[in-house]
Image: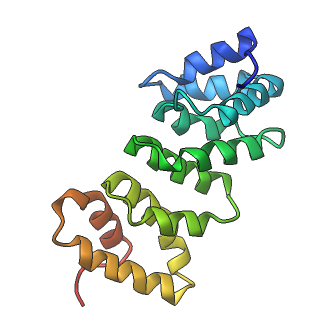
Amino acid sequence: MPEALSDAAKKLLAAIEVPEMNPVDQQKLEHETPPRVRDELMAHLAQRFEPPVTAPVLGRAWAFADAGNRRALEQLYLVNLRSTNHSARAACVRALGRLGYADMDDVALIALRDDHDEVSAAAVEILVKRARTDALVAGLLRHVARARAAQPEFQSTRELLRAHGFDAAP
């Protein structure tokens, strides 16, 4: 069980748990939160298994990354890649990409086959960069575009692929 949080870390957690946060307020929070509080909260979240970390927290925690909590954040996101909540899974894929996670391409390749459009699109966001220099990934994305062409539930994935030159045409 993770240790009890300080009042400052509890306050930060409550602030980033809100479903909708004003971007200006988030930026202010990012700049004003002391590293000690950031590190404490990220270590706490990285050790938490139940209840699962919420999608809003997963979507915002990466912005508090620093040298003291990078490994905790990576663990937090890796553990939550299999969340039952699709928004949480997508947040994990995007955050690991923003953190420059060493095995990010592998994570994105796995997430590409997710059953939800939001997660698949997050994977495509990562993979289109690699496809510029990797013919195998480019070929895969062309095949994904063709496979998703007849699946209306994957609209974001299709649009993102099309915007990067991967259309459904053979």
Q: Is residue 139 above or below residue 43?
A: below
- Closest to the observer: 8 or 113? 113
Figure quadrant of the N terminus: top right
Q: Against 85, is 149 above or below? A: below
Name the spot of residue 68 as percent of width and height, x first: 83, 39
Taking the view exactly as shown, the residue that stands out farthest to the top is 7
**Residue at 42%, 66% in the rendered image:** 112
Occupied quadrant, residue 19? top left
Depth check: give the residue in front, 33 or 102: 102
Q: How many marks?
A: 0
In the picture, which quadrant includes the C terminus? bottom left
From what the image shows, is residue 7 above or below residue 32? above
Vertical placement of residue 32 versus 145, above or below = above
Q: Tell me how the rendering is colored.
A: rainbow
At a point 47% along the width and 24% down the height, the residue shown is: 21
| Residue 10 x, y percent position in the rendering | 66, 14
Residue 119: % across, % down: 40, 54
Taking 127 as reference, is 65 left or right? right
Which residue is found at the position 83% from the left and 25% from the top? Answer: 36
Q: Could you tell me residue 35's position as x and y percent? A: 81, 28
Q: Quadrant of residue 12?
A: top right
Image point (68%, 58%), residue name: 101
32 vs 162, left or right, is right
